[in-house]
Image (cartoon, rainbow, N blue to C red):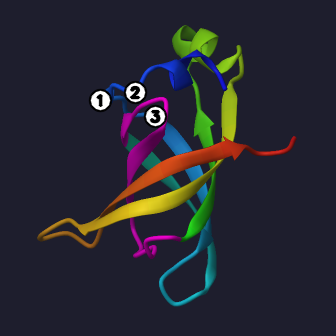
Amino acid sequence: MPNIAERETRRGLRLPLNVSGRDARGAPFAEGAETVNISGGGLCFVATRSVPVGARLDLRIQVPAALRHHFGGRAVYAVKAVVCRLEHIEGAATYRVGVRFLGELEA
């Protein structure tokens, strides 16, 4: 895991990412999203669809140049994750999704 995995403190970091998996109805999806915070063990992002707790997702996080040393020098950090928390954002058609990292995606 990259250096960021050594830290468990959440950092309020807004990074673009691509998310793919299956939604609450079992339909496959892929969409762009933005992180709310990130730690070495997982992250929280805002999604436009409900994704069930326990669902496995593929995430591709766009890493700015200034932070790439935390991600092994990569511009895109690709990781498998499992949904641990889902929270509907009141008054919006969006959800906060908390995930735990499971490991890096194969290249």
Q: Is residue 12 above or below residue 47?
A: above
Mark toward the viewer: 1 or 3: 1
Task: Give the residue furthest to the left.
Answer: 91
* Residue picked out by circle 3: 15
**Residue 94 picture location, percent across and down:** 30, 67
Depth check, mark 2 against mark 3: the one in front is 2
Q: Quadrant of the C terminus?
A: top right
Residue 83 horizontal/vertical position (percent):
47, 62
What is the CA distance from the residue labelled 1 to the residue labelled 3?
10 Å
Task: Identify which residue, 42 or 91, lies in the foreground.
Answer: 42
Residue underneath mark 1: 12
Q: Which residues are magenta?
A: 36-54
Q: Position of residue 19 (x, y in %)?
A: 58, 57
Does residue 8 appear to the left or right of 40 in the view shown? left
Mark 1: amino acid: Gly
Three-letter amino acid code at the position of disc 3: Leu
Neighbourhood count class around disc 2 (C-alpha, 10 Å): few under 14, some 14–19, many 20 upward: few
Q: Quadrant of the N terminus?
A: top right
The residue under label 2 is 8
Q: Amino acid at mark 2?
A: Glu
